[in-house]
Image (spheres, grey):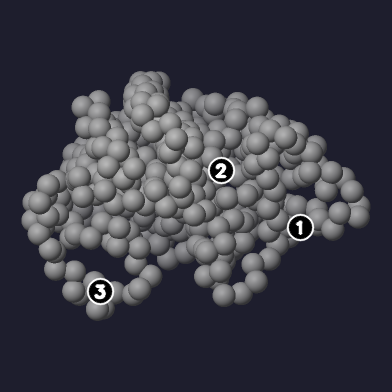
């Protein structure tokens, strides 16, 4: 694919140095539909990034777009704080009918603000308020957001350093298989909890991702998650599952913790909950934890009504029969896994491991710089993929759940070529 030099001057002169994704994909995108994005020169790119997991149903999904346009055309309320609106009522009723009741989940729904880190901050505040304790336990290589409370339970040293102040009241523990199976699960954690001389303040809660996306596609086993839930119950700690990137069907089931058969005390949801890439997040929690005073946690943009509209359309379209959606995602995931097996066999000396669930997969190389070279070459070949892991050592595949078999095969072929050509 021949790429003419795009005009990036205004971004380079005016926009802050903090910009990141645009450095890896140096073109100017103009439009997008489904699993493809197009730059202003008309070049097409197959998208295996999906807005970092915010576009599970693809770009400009026509069903969701129609619902949004109809709502705007009739002058539906756009900004509503936490006022009662028809759009919010319809979303809440649909979410209860299609998501919570079929799974026998008792949760109250809180709209904490439009982003994932808003949901995490509210979850941490609520846990501390309920338990009257400050400490929160998180896990190695976790990522929970960029605001201070979320950073305090995030593992990445580079991101933590950006805070500029000490990040307190968070204690990391080893994630599943952190010691390569040489230490029993939770031996260290439980010993610290029970030893009065350990120096660990009694935690209010534990926060965990069932699959660590930014941390390198580290997949927790169902039995590990069940043991964690049991530990929390024994030790009077709340279990918070951060399902911001792995929820909304990314791993197959609507919630990523369903496979483990657990019911977390608190769940954070964002990214693809609006279905259209519109800002929206939820904090879900058991009714007995709803101890908030009115207005004790709020936010100007927690009532993003256009997001409620597209979220409702997404639920009605894809989760009225959730089993069909889950089956399709798992089938696409098996398609990815077969391709990664083939790439690994072809590059035995170079590939360290592949891992994933549903439609989130990672390919890790022994050479930690290799992943960024693969991503760069993939872009040149018309495929958008990002890297993850503490040193960017993992190629991360996050295609839309609605991607076709043919599009998935096309992208996986490009990935295989990028791996081959960066050897």
| 164 w.r.t. 128: above or below | below
Q: Earlier in the sequence, mark 1 or mark 2?
A: 1
The location of residue 423, given as percent across then percent down, is 34, 43
Horizontally, is 112 left or right of 57 in the view? right
Q: Secondary structure at mark 1?
A: loop
Q: Quadrant of residue 59?
A: top left
* Cα–Cα span, label 3 and label 1: 46 Å
Tag 2 near tag 3, CB within 8 Å: no
Horizontally, is 164 left or right of 113 in the view? right
Residue at image point 84% right, 44% down: 191
* Cα–Cα span, label 1 and label 2: 22 Å
Tell me the residue that label 1 is attached to.
Answer: 133
**Callout 1 crowding tier (Cα within 10 Å): few <14, some 14–19, many ≥20:** some
Tell me the residue that label 3 is attached to.
Answer: 12
Residue at image point 52% right, 70% down: 162
**Callout 2 crowding tier (Cα within 10 Å): few <14, some 14–19, many ≥20:** many
Horizontally, is 292 left or right of 405 in the view? right
Q: Secondary structure at mark 3?
A: helix
Q: Earlier in the sequence, mark 2 or mark 3?
A: 3
From this viewpoint, is residue 67 visible? no
Residue at image point 65% right, 71% down: 166
Q: Residue furthest bottom?
A: 13
The location of residue 288, given as percent across then percent down, is 67, 43
Tell me the residue that label 2 is attached to.
Answer: 209
The location of residue 251, given as percent across then percent down, is 45, 32
From this viewpoint, is residue 412 visible? yes
Nearer the observer, 176 or 208:
176
Nearer the observer, 303 or 380:
380
Residue at image point 34% right, 51% down: 373
């Amino acid at each position: 694919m021949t790429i003419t030099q795009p005009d990036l001057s205004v971004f380079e002169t005016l926009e802050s140095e903090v910009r990141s994704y645009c450095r890896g994909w140096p073109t100017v995108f103009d439009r997008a539909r489904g699993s493809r994005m197009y730059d202003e020169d008309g070049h097409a790119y197959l998208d295996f990034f999906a807005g970092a997991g915010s576009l599970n149903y693809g770009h400009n999904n026509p069903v969701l777009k129609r619902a949004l346009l109809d709502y705007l055309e009739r002058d539906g309320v756009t900004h509503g704080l936490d006022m009662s609106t028809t759009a919010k009522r319809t979303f809440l009723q649909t979410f209860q009918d299609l998501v919570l009741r079929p799974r026998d989940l008792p949760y109250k729904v809180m709209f904490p603000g439009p982003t994932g880190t808003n949901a995490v901050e509210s979850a941490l505040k609520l846990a501390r308020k309920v338990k009257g304790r400050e400490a929160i336990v998180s896990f190695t290589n976790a990522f929970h957001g960029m605001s201070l409370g979320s950073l305090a339970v995030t593992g990445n040293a580079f991101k933590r350093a950006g805070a500029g102040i000490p990040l307190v009241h968070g204690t990391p523990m080893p994630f599943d298989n952190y010691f390569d199976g040489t230490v029993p699960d939770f031996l260290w954690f439980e010993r610290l909890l029970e030893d009065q001389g350990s120096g660990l303040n009694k935690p209010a809660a534990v926060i965990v991702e069932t699959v660590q996306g930014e941390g390198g596609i580290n997949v927790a086993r169902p039995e590990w998650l069940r043991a964690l839930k049991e530990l929390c119950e024994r030790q009077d700690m709340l279990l918070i599952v951060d399902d911001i990137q792995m929820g909304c069907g990314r791993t197959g089931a609507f919630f990523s913790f369903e496979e483990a058969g657990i019911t977390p005390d608190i769940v954070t949801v964002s990214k693809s909950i609006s279905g259209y890439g519109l800002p929206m997040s939820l904090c879900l929690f058991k009714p007995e934890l709803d101890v908030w005073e009115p207005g004790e946690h709020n936010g100007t943009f927690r009532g993003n009504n256009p997001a409620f509209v597209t979220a409702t359309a997404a639920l009605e379209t894809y989760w009225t029969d959730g089993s069909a959606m889950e089956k399709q995602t798992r089938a696409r995931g098996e398609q990815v896994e077969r391709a990664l097996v083939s790439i690994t066999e072809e590059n035995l000396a170079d590939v360290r491991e592949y891992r994933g669930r549903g439609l989130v997969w990672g390919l890790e190389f022994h050479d930690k710089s290799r992943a960024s070279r693969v991503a760069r070459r993939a872009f040149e070949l018309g495929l958008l993929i990002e890297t993850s892991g503490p040193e960017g050592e993992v190629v991360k595949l996050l295609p839309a759940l609605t991607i076709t078999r043919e599009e998935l095969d096309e992208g996986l072929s490009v990935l295989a070529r990028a791996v081959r050509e960066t050897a």
